[in-house]
Image (cartoon, coloured by chain):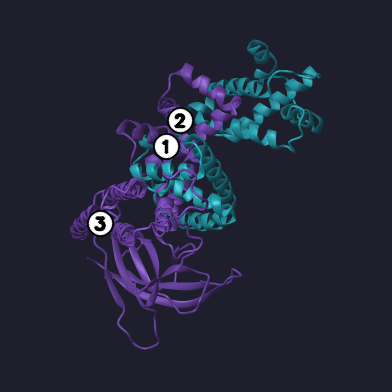
Chain colours: A purple, B cyan
Amino acid sequence: MNANDNNLLRSYLLGALPEAETEICDELSFTDDAFVVRLQAVEDDLIDSYLQNELPQQEREQFQAYYLASPRRQEKVKFAQSFQSFAKRQVLAPTMAPAVSFAPAEPVRQPIGETTSWWESLRNLFALPNLTMQWGMAAAALLLLLGGGWLFTETQRLRGQMNAAQTEQATLQQRERELQAQIEQQRTTNTKTVEQLNEELKRTQQQLEQLKQQQELAAQQARQQAPIGLPNLLHVELTPQTRGIGKTVEVTIPARTDYAVLQLAAPEDDFQSYQAELLTSADEKLRWKSGKLKARTTGTSRVIDLSVRAKLLPPGSYVVKLNGIAANGQAEEIRKYSFKVVKP
Amino acid sequence: MEEALSYQIGSGKEARPWQATPESLARLLHWLDGGVDSQGQAYEEMRQRLVTYFDRKNCRTPDDLADETLNRVMKWLEQNRKEVDAEPAKICYNTARFVFHEYLRRPEHAQNDLDEMPVANQPAEDPRVTAHLNEEEAAKEKRLGCLETCSAKLPTEDREMIVRYYYGEQRVKLDNRKALAAERGMTANALSIKACRVRDKLRACVTECVC
């Protein structure tokens, strides 16, 4: 099935095909198993593209007017939204179990897979006869890996610069593949000198340095002005309530904030996961309840991120009740955090 | 054949409504299986296709219409009382078309309820949506929790595959998919089908878990 077929299926799913073609697709969706599977795959990609804002304006409008008219399909979109968050979490938070590694699960059958070839090439490097070049290229590969890793972390933090950073990363990965190809060439023809490869390595390092500077600049810009279309976040650090008289944390939520990210100082108890409840202080009325949460390590401490929609936090006093969930699924209240939202 | 079907099973108007019996259901299952006992799986698949068909047509009650279609097919099989050679998928599709056209002619279908309006035509601030924001947020968290639980049940290889397959945007996503297909020695098409199946399995598990 080619791209044209995919476009036709997309039009079918968006209710934009002429009646005669629609009927053909309708019939195939009963009689042809391969068509059904293909249609499902195209539908999944269509939903993802919509959520990632990749659809052209016209298709986007058709999607909203036709596709989203069905509650059943709305559910599919909600699932896809959660699935994207889940996939991102799996990739970006390697400490979380069961995290997904981008390292391959099985041997590479063709040497064009990017992550596999990193490991393959690193291993192969140590089989080369020229030690200087081995270590030089190992350093190059490691630098690229570290550069890629650094980019990844930075990209996550910036969020708003996600697409630009990913494009840069892809470029570096492409460069890495080219260098690997050169290693291969070197191994067989032995024509390229170590100096030339070192020169290339230096250039790659310079590119990484430039990229780092661009990212820092982008980070500054992102901090000054949140990009359009992305949620505005407000980070608030909260420490647990104690019996002593302490000053309640006062939070001012700017008008355009979408989410308040409450960073709760996590307890040292080793719970499988956590769950939090947001209550109003005065009457302890439940305003919101989270799903399962995981603690993350930051420096020497551990925190639990709680993203609460800003709409749920009008001025007033609040308490966050943190429950620990043991391996057997039993919940136990472990801490309370209080804070006050004041008018901006 | 369509005319005959229209006459025999396309019309739901009769003096005494026809009732399905355990025998007629057994006959339908046998016919859908085509000689191989699928333990009801063929029936489930056909029902799912019918529900999807009616849903794609933006019908309000896809499940009811799917059941109505299957009832009519059961009745048709009973009236024939012999081995019917016609392809089940085709018969079901043709019956579904009649059911759909009848549905379109029903007077209540013309009702212009807020629920029926396409999202683009709905008020920007649907009060019901606002009222359910809290629940929606909680549902989202629950779905994520279920996703973790359900994905943990998948074989490691499948779990890693779908995360890598669907992760990223635009160029990054395409690069991931290309690399993944190369690693597994699969064509892009075969990989997309495999990923789609696993995602579908995951979706079914999450739907069950959330309910």
| Secondary element type, mark 3 | loop
Task: Tell me, yes or no, whether the two marked residues, 1 and 2, touch with CB atoms within 8 Å.
Answer: yes
Q: Quadrant of the C terminus of chain A?
A: bottom left
Tell if the residue under mark 1 belongs to the same chain as the one under mark 2. Answer: yes
Image quarter for residue B125?
A: top left
Instruction: For marks 3 and 1, give the one nearer the viewer.
Output: 1
Image quarter for residue A32?
A: top right
Distance of mark 3 from mark 1, alpha carbons? 30 Å
Chain identity of mark 1: A
Residue A193 coordinates in the image, percent (x, y): 25, 52
What's the amino acid at mark 2?
A: Leu
**For residue A46, which numbered disc appears in the image?**
1
What's the amino acid at mark 3?
A: Arg
Drawn side of residue A84 relative to residue A171, left or right:
right
Residue found 38% across the figure and 77% down from its top = A301
Which residue is nearer to you in this view: B96 or A209? A209
Residue found 63% across the figure and 13% down from its top = B2
Residue B47 sits above or below residue B84 on the image: below
Which residue is nearer to you in this view: A197 or A25? A197
**For residue A13, which numbered disc appears in the image?**
2
Drawn side of residue B19 relative to residue A255, left or right:
right
Which residue is nearer to you in this view: A331 or A328? A328
Distance of mark 2 from mark 3, alpha carbons? 35 Å
